[in-house]
Amino acid sequence: MSTSESQQRTEIGRGRSGVVFSNGTKIFSAKDSLAKLVNYIFLGAPNPYTWNKDAIMCAHLERNIHSTLFPYMLGKKAKMSNSHGTFWDDELMAYGLKVEIINGRHVSLHHPFSEERESELGDLVEKIMRPLQKELYNAGFDGLMWQAGFGTPNALSNFMLEENDGPKQTFAWIDAESAVPALFPLNISKLFSFYLPVSFRNRRPLFDDVDTNKLESYLSRHADNLEKKLGSERFDDLIVNLELLADHQEKWKSMRRVDRSITYSLKKEKITENEASYYSKHLILWYRRQASKALKKLPMKLYRLSYDAISKIILNGWKVIKHAPKFVVNKEYRSEVIRDYVDERISAWEKRKQLTSVQGDYLREQLKEEQTSAYLSDFFFLMMVVKPVEKAFELGVLPVLYATGVIDAQTLFWSELLLGSIDRSIYTGIKQTQDLFKPKEQRRPRGLALLVGFVPTGGNFAYPLQTIYADTSKRTELAEFIIYDTFTRVGANIPIWGGKDTRTEHFFNHIPDLIIRKRKDLSGSIKSSDLLQDKIYL
């Protein structure tokens, strides 16, 4: 790819295996240190799609094969983001695919306005992913079972709902290339019943492997129906692509472990052609060279990681300490911080196309309502001021008191468990006492917040719940959104099996359904005229 072309591209998506740009390219240059380490251990080099020309050709051919087979396997309910070719990117020093860009979004998360979209997750899992897994298995696409979600929650993000004007939804498989070998499913039974047996059969870790003999048999069995549905020309192309896939996969998979490491270093211009030729004949010298480099880098790498982590903690801690007094005493500043935070979270959902701009603006309007703002102020005061002090006490003071014998183990346990509950109860009690000296019309009911606040962990949502249940005539969507957003962020930040648009994120996103009442009547707080005029629902 030329320099001028690389300068014109804009990043629109990033996964563990690569980066997708607006010019229709996916380059396998993702800088995931954990994935890189895993690939070094199991494969001898980082992601093969980054540096191996036969591997990237396999990715290209597999996408073309799937693009042809999808209408036969799943009808018009799903499609594959096709590949139009491969290339080497000089700037990022990695191979890439020229892919079809899908105009769409991932399946809907739950939120106050999601009622009409909430069937999307079930449709994707039950009508697309599971039938696809069965078809992939029958056709010999063993490695792609991983990318189709067999035993792993991460694969949900590999599919998008294509935006079109028609009444029927079309799901698109946008990411069919793995970032690591298929050896780490969340469902451990799938590891022992499928992934490990196939890996032992192939005598290598399963990494997007295709059983080409099984695929050939599949095409032979379905030849008449395929030729009838696709036409003889497309069916012939399918056979040609299978033969090319078998050839490139054999070259890729048959490489010696040491040759993978040497070729990667050569493609990254860490060694010359002459050095590559020399080390391929002197394996011990190559491994000694690599071990020496790793040992030299390790102390600096550990120092860098520790420094970055400590710096982040200190920087964030200093920000809290610096602004906490102003947040406590200055009501206008506190309101500004809350508005900025909530607006940022709404914008994040809008960017992901989980909220429309109209829905986002509707939530922002609720920030101006007096009662909503009062309860939000209580919620953020507890989370931004009380919670950091509480955690410092739990992690610092209490262990020291136990270590020095001031308190026993039982006292330590109950203190760790109930400290947050006590803090919330004291805060709410003070607020209720203050309200006794205010005119009746200015008082805010806090009975539910007092009751819920005493529940360990779950009590953190006492004030959003108080907002929802305090007065059913008031709009409560903003409080509901904050609860959904908080739980959703937990799932999005879980390492390895979590992340945005994974089933892990959706699992946590659905937890608030247990405490937010009348989910099917959320539109009741919006006037019918508003729905017609603003099109709250898509």
Image (spheres, rainbow, N blue to C red):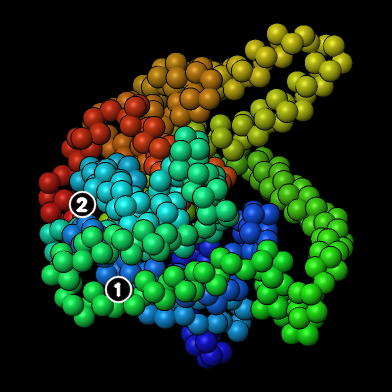
Q: Position of residue 172 (x, y in %)?
A: 30, 62
The image position of residue 373, as x and y in percent, is 42, 39
Where is 429 relative to 533, above or below? Answer: above
Closer to the chain start, of discs 2 and 1, is 1
As measured in the structure, the alpha-carbon distance from the residue carrying label 2 to the one carrying label 1 is 42 Å
> Would you identify the image quadrant in which residue 369 lies?
top left
Type of amino acid at the residue the image marks with label 2? Tyr
Residue that numbered label 2 is attached to: 537
At label 1, counting other C-alpha atoms closer than 10 Å, the crowd grade (few under 14, some 14-19, many 20 or more) is many
Judged left or right of residue 58, residue 261 is right
Whether 378 is drawn above or below 369: the answer is above
Q: Quadrant of residue 100?
A: bottom left
Quadrant in which the C terminus is drawn: bottom left
Q: Amino acid at mark 1?
A: Leu
At numbered mark 2, what does the secondary structure look like: helix, strand or loop? loop
Where is residue 371 shown, x and y percent of the image?
Answer: 37, 34
Task: Name the side, left or right, on which 415 lies relative to 504.
Answer: right
- Residue drawn at point x = 34 percent, y = 27 percent: 514
Q: Is residue 487 visible?
A: no
Q: Which mark is residue 238?
A: 1
- With 71 as the anchor, is 420 left or right in this view? right
Residue 420 marker? none
